[in-house]
Image: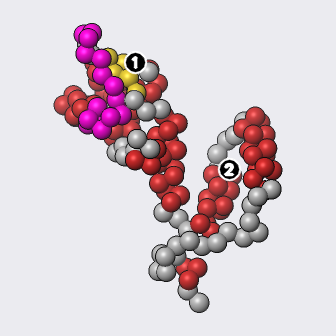
Amino acid sequence: MSSTDITITPTEWEIMRMVWAEQTITSPKILELSSNLFDWKSSTVKTLIGRLIEKGYLNKDTTVRPMLLSPAISEEEANYSRIDEKVSQMCTKDRGALITHLIENNELSIDEIEEMIHFLKEKKQTAPKTVTCLCPVGQCSCHIN
């Protein structure tokens, strides 16, 4: 499964966050955690778990009782998929502004900033002078005179 194939609904995402946090977790523990966070019925939680198993995002170990659940995909992979999907829907000329926005509006550690500086210096060596719009006509304002 490529990271671009990951489709997790917002409510499924909440279940996955619990699984990613614990790495192995039982459905009763998910029910307990979710009851502290959301006004969900147990049937809703069980349905969400079932969907995540069906989609291949959760592994289940039925050799023990209660059944143990573990992530079949990493949180990083899922996050990158979400970001890649949103970025792919933007004009290529607007993507730099999005990255700048993310940097301006999120707290970063010194190590993270140093890593970005290093990466940007490398990226600059092969970067084009300007980014070309790759959108089909009608999909962005670049094509409007």
Relative height, residue 122 to residue 49 (above, below): below
Q: At 68% from the left edge and 50% from the top edge, which residue is drawn?
A: 103
Q: At 47% from the left edge and 32% from the top edge, which residue is drawn?
A: 74
Image x and y of residue 44, in percent: 22, 34
Residue position for label 2 = 103
Q: What's the distance in space between the residues labelled 1 and 2, CA to CA?
A: 33 Å
| In this rendering, position of residue 108 left or right of residue 76 | right
Q: Is residue 48 visible?
A: no
> Image quadrant of residue 32?
top left
Circle 1 crowding by C-alpha within 10 Å: few under 14, some 14–19, many from 20: some
Q: At 46% from the left edge and 40% from the top edge, which residue is drawn?
A: 78
SS for tag 2?
helix
Q: At 55% from the left edge and 86% from the top edge, which residue is drawn?
A: 144
Image x and y of residue 76, in percent: 52, 36
45, 93: nearer the viewer: 93
Magenta part of the protein: which range?
51-65
Q: Nearer the viewer, mark 1 or mark 2?
A: 1
Image x and y of residue 14, in percent: 38, 35
Marker count (numbered): 2
- Magenta span contains residue 52: yes
| In this rendering, position of residue 34 left or right of residue 122 | left
Furthest residue to the bottom? 145
Relative height, residue 126 to residue 109 (above, below): below
Furthest residue to the left? 43
48, 138: nearer the viewer: 138
SS for tag 1?
loop
| In this rendering, position of residue 100 left or right of residue 11 | right
Residue position for label 1 = 24
